[in-house]
Image: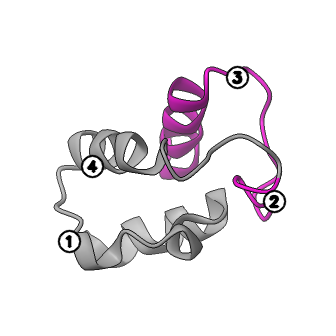
Amino acid sequence: MDNKERILAIVRKVSNQTAAPDPDESLFDSGFLDSFALPDMVSELEREFGIKIPDSDLNPRKFESIAKIQSYIESRM
């Protein structure tokens, strides 16, 4: 499973949805995530990828889409 698939699995788990958003689709505007789900998703990303995401990065715009999340994660690895 590549990073994109791993991220998508986390988004589906946190959002309780089975649909797959487009890579550049806003996860917040499309209803997959809201500000309350962001900390849960970040915790799952940290656990899955073995990274630490600083509180200063808990900005919804950094995690707006699958593509942005993938880019962020890969820059932290």
Cα separation, mark 2 vs mark 1, equals: 24 Å
Q: Is residue 3 magenta?
A: yes
Which residue position holds label 1? 54
What label sits on residue 49 in the rendered view?
A: 4
Query: Magenta span covers which residues?
Result: 1-29
Residue at mark 1 to residue at mark 4: CA–CA distance: 14 Å
x and y, in percent, of residue 53 in the image: 24, 65
Residue drawn at (80%, 27%), measured in percent from left and top?
A: 19
| Up-down relation of residue 40 to residue 19 (above or below) | below
Name the residue rendered at 70%, 23% in the picture. Answer: 17
The percent position of residue 7, horizontal first and vertical second, equals 51, 45
Q: CA distance from mark 4 to mark 2?
A: 22 Å
Which of discs 1 and 4 lies nearer the camera? The answer is 1
**Disc marking residue 25:** 2
Judged from the image, the secondary structure of the residue bearing numbered disc 4 is: helix
The answer to whether residue 18 is left or right of residue 51 is right
Of labels 1 and 4, earlier in sequence is 4
Quadrant in the rendering for residue 77 = bottom left
- The residue carrying mark 3 is 17
The residue type indicated by label 3 comes to: Gln
Q: Amino acid at mark 4?
A: Phe
Give the residue type that dot 1 points to: Pro
Residue 20 spot, x, y in % from top left: 77, 35
Residue 50 location (% of width, % of height)? 17, 50
Q: CA distance from mark 4 to mark 3?
A: 21 Å
The answer to whether residue 5 is left or right of residue 29 is: left
Secondary structure found at label 2: loop
* Mark found first going from the N terminus, 1 or 3: 3
